[in-house]
Image (cartoon, rainbow, N blue to C red):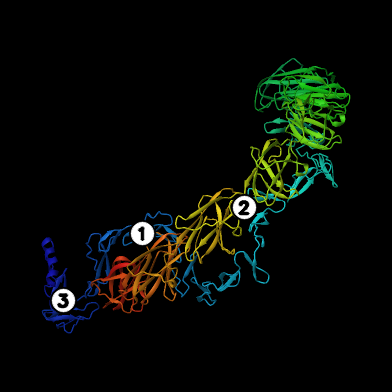
Amino acid sequence: MKSLRLLVPLLFAAACSPSIPPLDACDPNPCSGDRSVCTSVAGVASCSCNAGLQDVAGVCVRAQSCNPNPCTGAHKSVCTATNGLVACACDDGFRDDGAGGCVADDPCANDPCTEANRGVCVAQGSTAICRCDSGFLENAQGVCVAAQSCTPNPCAMPGKSVCAVNDNVVTCACDVGLVDDGMGGCTAINPCANNPCTQPNRGVCVAQGSTAICQCDSGFIDDGTGACVRAPSCMPNPCTQPNRTQCSTVGGLVTCGCDSGYRPDVGGQCVPMQACNPNPCTQPNRGVCTEQSGVAICGCNAGYRDQSGACVLDDACDPNPCTQPNRGVCTAANGTAICGCNAGFQDQGGTCVVVDVCSPNPCNQPNRGVCTALNGAAVCGCNAGFVDMNGSCVQLDACNPNPCNQPNRGVCSAVDGGASCACNIGYQEGPTGCEVIAPPTCSTQHSTGDSYEPDECPALAKPIFPGTPQQHTYAPAGDVDWVLFNADAGTVVLGEVSGVSSYVSLYGSNGATAIATNGSNRVHVKLASTGTFFMQARPQTASAMGNTTLSLTFSSDDHADSRDGNPSVVMPANPGTSVNGVFNFPGDVDCLAVPVQANRVYQLEELTTLDVRLTVFTATGTYIPRTDSEWLRFKTAVAETLFLCVEANASSSLSAWTLRLSDSGVDDHADSRSDNPATLTPSASPGNTLTGKFDFVGDVDCLAVPVQAGRIYHFAETSGTDVVDTLYTATGTFVASTEDESHRFLSQNDETLYFCTRASSATNIASWTLTVTDVGVDDHANSRTENPATLLPGATVTGQFQYPYDTECLAVPVQANRIYVFSETSNADVYTAIYTATGTFVSQTDTESHRFIAGSTQTLYLCTRAFNAASLASWTLRVTDEGVDDYVNSRADGPVTLTPTASPGASLSGNFQYPYDVECVAVPVQANRIYTFAETTNVDVFLSVYTATGTYLAETDAESVRFEAGSSQTLFLCTRSFNANVVSGWTLRVTDEGVDDHADSRDDTPAPLSPGASLSGRFDLTNDTDCVAVPVIANHGYTFEETTSTDVYLTVYTATATLISTTDSEAVHFKASASQTLFLCTRAYASTLSAWTLRVIDNGEDDHADARTGATGLTVAGSTSNGALQYTGDFDYFTFTTAGPLALRVVTTGVATSVRVETATGTAIATGTGPGSLTFSVTAAGTYFVRVSTGALGAYTVGVAN
């Protein structure tokens, strides 16, 4: 056959290629001997062994059979004997390499994977393993289905963004540090969730961050060696000493404390406690303790008063204790009155002397540092060399010192109160600033261009005459033209160039000294000397050429430029003298001489719309301050000649002006109390009136006002002008000052006071009207020592605050143990205070009402004043007798009895009748019954419960106390308002809730609960624990659970109190280690009084071994085994064996599980989760184990497959 296969291509080739004759390398036969079989292949002869022979290492030997196997080549041990010939073939999984050898076969070469979506072939030895295509996964049924993906991440819930694909199902897991909360969300990891605390008696787990701290169980303490031992207990109570029955355990020791109402003395004995000893008053500034009916009442410290429940500093200045001369200003500091000097006075060695308002100098505005005392007030004026302009002090000479510091620009001119800087002599304005003037040169002279050429330098300048313009031409480029003229000193010269844009400069007689270089096409100046002058015209652009017109105009100045220039004299008159003038050149100043008389008022004003500045000097140059640029009104002190100068605010202005000078006469009123002011005598309403006018800037007008001691006066400025009023005594003592145009006060003496007024704005030249009214005497006494009128309870008195800080007092007789309300019933905002006859402060409030119980029969003094000291409001005071207290204040006062009844209970109502009122009732209770003591209205109250001996049982501000009575006795329920100032109604209700429905511990004979059954109950009081007894069988798994929505703790104990498990997750899953009775106890997670239902489930005997020993057998590729995870931590072990290396799968169905494959020594080969398939390989024959553990409780199947 081999020879035939070799000949076919040759015969085919011969048939297809007739042009090439067939080549037979075996003709003649070159083969001989035992190797005489010739085969021609591609024209080459191949010699093979004769029939019956076989090639062995190149030698033809007699063929043998395959037994024994002669095939010993590597991977070539398959022997076949045919016709006496032995053929050696490659082993399974290997193939001929074409060179007589064998290489490993590729089981995937022929692409054996044809199942839908399972086209990925993986060679494992000689076996082709078909796996799911990319994007597909194998499901539990072994079918490749489309794979789910986490890209993009579908997990968008906050805290739950960890995406995973398990068994082709996308699951969203909680972020690091979070755990599933059981409701689909994520919450912070509770390290105690799986109860890691398993040490005996140390089963209380406390989470500290992510760490679980195991603490001793209730009733146990750490003995210092790390063991939890039973703690000393207060049940039964070992504390039996008189008045020392309060048992507590601290650090494993039982401590016996004093009963409520008792305290330890220095000898350690429990002695009766006074309500104020020790002092319970610890609120800020409320440290004064007073015992009232056995209750501690906390009052404000000395120097403090109660204001809306807070202790605030008392007003030690009411009434004002400051009576030293000129020292009547009272300031309260820490409850103490500090007396300071009156306004206008200052302390000097302990004496209040008239204040020097200019020391220290208050004038700190820029350039306004000159202080002048004017009627007790400091007036700030401009510094020397500065003038007031529109409220700002600007330099009188803006060029002194010279602010011009730019290069070559140091010529300063005062313009608009500011400095204007021009080029220095020898420089002229140019495109880049002040450029040096080139020395005049005649070197560029030429005769072309115009008839005045050559005129390129002063030496070639041609004369020009006023009123005779000249036509010039700039040609060639760079041409300049010079002209000359003669003029006298004082001549106003205007030189101009029109046509080409030019610069014009004016020079002195030497042709080099610049007089004016304005940087424009004109110069306009007043000459200071007589002589010959030169004017230069040059184009603003050096290359410019063209025709120009040069002109010259002469004029004269109409007024002197300063007081030294022999100014014209102008006499002021009434209604006024007008003077006209013109600013003849830029910067022109025009001055006039004005004779004035002593002590007269003069007004100067500019009448046109021109914006000007007016300045007035004395003959010696002293500047008279002004407050307006175009108007000035002042009062003279002496007869003299003043000098009035006017200048335009815009220095370039050449406009006309008109000044009017008026003599306004003498001042209408004295300027101070020493100037013999006119008298204004007060009269009853509507008062006596006097008018006047502020005649000049800063004018003060004063009047003499006689007053009588003990009478109230009202000084008012009624014209509407905004003024400042000041009041002095005859000796200059400052009494008061106000800008409110109105002042009320109580006169202390018969004397003459001096009332002075001035405009709030010093420039206000306005009229005023002053009215002085004698209001009469005070309607009520100012203190308890001034024989106040009596106000009987049930009556009302009205009055009025007649002047600032007016205090009104009344005498009120009260009886012991009766409740009174002192109140102000109008809408006036007031303070009210109560004093005893000796001046002891009882109470003060700004809430317009006092409610209190009188401690004794006496006369109290009720005083009121306005909350706003300046208020002149009317008031109404009322005193009401509210009767006696409706309920006793303590258990010792014989309280009424309120007997508990079944729901809804018995109730009793009353009222908190005054601040800190306490109301008590007696409540009989029976041992081992549960009671609820509650306040059932919406009033916010404290509740306190005491025994008959005063032992304190409970206090709460939650309006309800629920407890189990330890013995049959009478308890005392007391209530008071949470807000001590609340006066309202209350209702107390006491309810007998019956007995506890279930035992509180394993020692109290709890009710039985058999597995498979349920039992319900209720938490009857706060921290109530309910227990049941549950019989269990050894090696069975159990579930103890609470099945309602109530959030509870569950705890399981043995009969000897050994803790088996505790949890707050409402279910405990465990395996009973022995047949016994366990005790399942539950309590509410929070202080709830809700119902509960307990259920016990027997999950059966553990169905599979918990360790490799006793593991249930499985057969590879055999049937599956059933199992169930029956309790938390349940391990089920299975075993299987293999004869050699294998690729295997563990397949689970049913409940979620954790799967682990182990060697016989416990080494993990593979881990995974179920239900699903876990693929792994074993490398050797042997026994292996599969461990199935809890993912959740429930049934599952497990098997091992190839």
Q: Nearest to the eye among marks 1 and 2: give it.
A: 2
Residue 146 at what x, y percent from top left? 28, 57
Residue hosting label 1: 171
- Label whose residue precedes the other's in the sequence (3 or 2): 3
* Residue 457 visible here: no
The one of 1032 and 1184 positioned closer to us in this rendering: 1032
Residue farthest top in this picture: 467
- Label whose residue precedes the other's in the sequence (1 or 2): 1
Residue 916 - label: 2
Tell me the amino acid under the disc marked 2.
Tyr
Q: Nearest to the eye among marks 3 and 2: give it.
A: 2
Disc 3 and disc 1 in contact, CB within 8 angstroms: no
The one of 860 and 267 positioned closer to us in this rendering: 860
Tell me the amino acid under the disc marked 3.
Cys
Separation (CA) of disc 3 from disc 1 = 72 Å
Vertical placement of 1038 versus 710: above or below? below
Q: Quadrant of residue 656?
A: top right
Residue hosting label 3: 47
Tell me the amino acid under the disc marked 1.
Thr
- Secondary structure of the residue carrying tag 2 is loop
Q: Quadrant of residue 68?
A: bottom left
Vertical placement of 732 versus 643: above or below? below
